[in-house]
Image (tube, coloured by chain):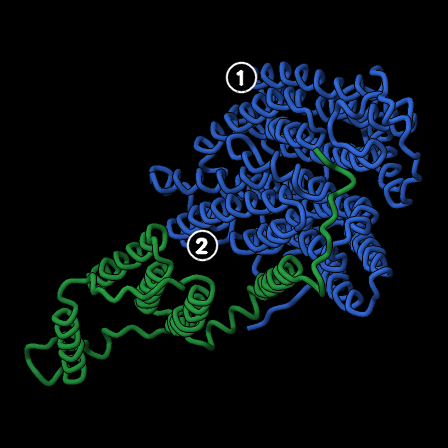
Chain colours: A green, B blue
């Protein structure tokens, strides 16, 4: 039951984030939508006991890649004057509510089990994350899936080599040849 | 936990992978005018990959690795030969083209080799993950290669269209795979096949199967997932278009067949009608559109869409009729082998002809036969073979296809056979139109005045190899039958 609730709670923001990426006019909102989607997915990984994947997902994608995205967006485009109007109504009240909620949750977690009205998970109800640990993952990755793993490495190399070859210009721009062969 | 790697079984992949690394390193140390050595190395490496395959074929037997998720059986070996030989021919026809083009050369071969490696991995895969990565490794580099002539807006368009639709289809494919994994709890084909009977009434299963077909049909550019193909073929460098029309198409095809045959035979009532429709539509739409093309590369693009439909016919017919799929398998593989040779030949002719006439328009090819009789003859040879005229190899491909359909029996298969027959006639018309332009039309002054340049040795070699094999198979089809028969032995892994 708890898993279904967590799934519902996290699947909705994940989908909403995805929709934002597609619909948002402002690329920064799009990036934020992607970020929200990734964080929600991270929680879903934890629910599946894939702790390592969840951590990597948040650190690498939500952290590093998204920061890079934002940098790129800022560098190439958002050069119009900042719009200082606050378009979200009641921002401050919402922030206060949110902070209070987080603090309350933190307290509940910290003191869980000490109050009768907070239900604590007992030891055996917390499942052991045997498949999602770093060791288990590494074992599978470098034995059964070693071929797929190596092929993926090549796939990434292709991406970077191809991107460089397509994007770079050496020295002065070559007068681009009209192809002598197939003109149509 | 013990696990072993059978290095002999992996030898073809290892040789190609070694060539890839060597090509990258060699490229680093060569000056611009010496870059063709990377091509030489690539050609040698791909040929070297054939050696262990021939050895394993002679030895016989099935090798299985990684709990049965990577299987090297005769089916896989045959396909690896097809991929390596067609990759070899594409590399050969690339040499002079890429050299003349003034774009990066070393990276071109690196990407092409990686794509060949992907198709090798894909043919041995017997689980969803390896299959997916193999397929992506095959198509991924092609997104980049399609846009290789980056100064040409058409090439940019080719790459972008291919990429966007490709990513979309990949997403659909992955979605289908994840549904399948979620339902059956396994990524291995044998385990999936075992779990299917309990799930037949599950609607999500039908959905996942259809998603898989959409994903594969895109790679094979079957109608109605073909929209990217003509523009991409036209804009991409011609050798890349040749590669797209043979290797990458075959990769999508083979992936589809492997999955349907080894993982999803229990639910053929879902995918068999879908394949039937794909086959009928691909043949008809491909051929009818080809009729109206003025550009020879576009004509070949639509013709290759139609040929994909012909290729699907035996398998779709057998699945719909519920007859022996293994028989259909061998018919499809025979068709694939022959198609690969004659289509690569046709593309080599296009490269040579475009150099001679300076144009890709069929009208500008008028009288090419007078200007250059050898090239004119080759044009006639490959296009007649594509049309299926004996004694060239193409007739045997068509013969095997119709034979397997008639063997399958049943009304719906006969309807499919009738559609195929009508389409063969339509196809003959537009193939013959090219030959008519080359031989019967009067050449323009401009063409006669053009200097008769000597062709590069590599393109001559490409033409010679594909011509020799096309004629040899046409006269002595047992050779191709061997490929079909051997490919029946598809091991389902099982580990």
Disc 1: which residue: B410
**In the rendering, at what x and y percent does residue B206 appear?**
39, 38
Q: Earlier in the sequence, mark 1 or mark 2?
A: 2
The residue lying furthest to the front in this view is A81
The dot on residue B186 is 2
**In the rendering, at what x and y percent does residue A101 appear?**
14, 74
Kindly indicate the quadrant of the structure image that contains residue B16: bottom right
**In the rendering, at what x and y percent does residue B125 appear?**
60, 52
- In this view of the protein, which residue sits in the foreground, B238 or B78? B238
Measuring 79% from the left and 37% from the top, which residue is drawn there? B351
- Asked if one can make out residue A131 in the rendered structure from this viewpoint, the answer is no
- Asked if one can make out residue A183 in the rendered structure from this viewpoint, the answer is yes
Q: Is residue B347 above or below residue B52?
A: above
Q: Chain of mark 1?
A: B
Task: Look at the numbered discs 1 and 2 and tell me whether their residues touch, using CB distance below 8 Å.
Answer: no
Crowding at dot 1, Cα within 10 Å, few <14 / some 14-19 / many 20+, comes out as: some
Q: Left of B90 or right of it: where is A82?
A: left
Measuring 89% from the left and 44% from the top, which residue is drawn there? B456
SS for tag 1? loop
Q: Is residue B411 above or below residue A107?
A: above
Say which quadrant the N terminus of chain A sits in.
Answer: bottom left
Q: Are marks 1 and 2 on the same chain?
A: yes
Give the alpha-carbon distance from disc 1 to disc 2, as whole Å.
35 Å
Q: Chain of mark 2?
A: B
Say which quadrant the C terminus of chain A sits in.
Answer: top right
Q: Is residue A152 above or below residue B217?
A: below
Q: Is residue B62 above or below residue B214?
A: below
């Amino acid at each position: 039951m708890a898993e279904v609730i967590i799934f519902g709670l996290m699947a909705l923001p994940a989908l909403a984030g995805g929709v934002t990426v597609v619909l948002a006019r402002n690329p920064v909102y799009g990036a934020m939508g992607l970020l929200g989607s990734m964080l929600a997915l991270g929680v879903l990984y934890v629910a599946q006991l894939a702790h390592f994947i969840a951590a990597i997902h948040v650190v690498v994608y939500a952290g590093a890649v998204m920061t890079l995205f934002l940098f790129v967006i800022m560098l190439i485009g958002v050069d119009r004057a900042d719009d200082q109007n606050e378009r979200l109504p009641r921002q401050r009240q919402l922030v206060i509510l949110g902070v209070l909620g987080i603090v309350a949750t933190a307290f509940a977690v910290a003191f869980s089990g000490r109050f009768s009205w907070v239900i604590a998970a007992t030891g055996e109800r917390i499942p052991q994350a045997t498949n999602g640990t770093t060791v288990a993952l590494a074992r599978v990755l470098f034995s059964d899936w070693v071929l797929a793993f190596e092929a993926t490495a090549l796939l990434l190399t292709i991406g970077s080599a191809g991107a460089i070859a397509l994007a770079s210009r050496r020295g002065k721009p070559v007068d681009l040849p009209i192809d002598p062969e197939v003109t149509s | 936990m013990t696990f072993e790697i059978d290095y002999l079984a992996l030898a073809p992949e290892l040789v190609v992978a070694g060539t890839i690394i060597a090509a990258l390193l060699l490229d680093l140390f060569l000056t611009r005018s010496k870059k063709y050595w990377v091509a030489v190395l690539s050609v040698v490496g791909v040929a070297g990959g054939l050696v262990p395959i021939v050895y394993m074929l002679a030895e016989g037997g099935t090798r299985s690795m990684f709990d049965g998720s990577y299987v090297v059986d005769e089916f896989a070996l045959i396909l690896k030969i097809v991929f390596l030989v067609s990759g070899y021919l594409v590399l050969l026809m690339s040499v002079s083209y890429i050299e003349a083009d003034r774009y990066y050369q070393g990276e071109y071969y690196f990407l092409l080799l990686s794509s060949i490696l992907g198709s090798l991995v894909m043919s041995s895969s017997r689980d969803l993950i390896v299959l997916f990565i193999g397929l992506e490794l095959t198509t991924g580099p092609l997104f980049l290669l399609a846009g290789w002539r980056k100064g040409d807006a058409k090439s940019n368009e080719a790459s972008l269209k291919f990429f966007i639709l490709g990513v979309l289809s990949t997403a659909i494919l992955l979605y289908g795979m994840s549904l399948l994994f979620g339902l059956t709890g396994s990524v291995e084909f044998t385990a999936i096949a075992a779990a299917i009977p309990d799930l037949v009434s599950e609607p999500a299963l039908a959905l996942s199967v259809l998603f898989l077909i959409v994903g594969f049909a895109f790679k094979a550019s079957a109608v109605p997932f073909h929209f990217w193909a003509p523009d991409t073929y036209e804009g991409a460098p011609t050798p890349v278009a040749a590669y797209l029309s043979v290797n990458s198409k075959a990769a999508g095809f083979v992936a589809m067949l492997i999955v349907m045959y080894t993982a999803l035979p229990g639910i053929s009532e879902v995918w068999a009608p879908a394949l039937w429709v794909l086959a009928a539509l691909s043949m008809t739409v491909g051929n009818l559109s080809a009729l109206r093309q003025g550009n020879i590369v576009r004509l070949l693009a639509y013709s290759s869409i139609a040929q994909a439909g012909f290729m699907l016919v035996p398998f779709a017919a057998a699945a719909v009729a519920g007859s022996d799929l293994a028989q259909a398998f061998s018919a499809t593989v025979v068709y694939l082998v022959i198609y690969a040779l004659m289509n690569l030949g046709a593309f080599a002719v296009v490269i040579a002809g475009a150099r001679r006439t300076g144009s890709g328009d069929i009208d500008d090819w008028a009288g090419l036969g007078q200007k250059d009789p050898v090239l004119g003859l080759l044009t006639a040879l490959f296009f007649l073979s594509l049309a299926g005229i004996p004694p060239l190899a193409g007739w045997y491909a068509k013969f095997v296809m119709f034979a397997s359909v008639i063997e399958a029996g049943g009304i719906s298969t006969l309807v499919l056979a009738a559609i195929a027959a009508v389409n063969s006639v339509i196809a003959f018309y537009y193939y013959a139109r090219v030959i008519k332009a080359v031989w019967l039309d009067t050449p323009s002054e401009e063409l006669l005045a053009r200097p008769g340049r000597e062709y590069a040795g590599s393109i001559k070699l490409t033409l010679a190899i594909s011509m020799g094999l096309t004629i040899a198979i046409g006269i002595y089809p047992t050779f191709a039958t061997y490929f079909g028969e051997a490919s029946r032995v598809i091991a389902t892994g099982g580990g």
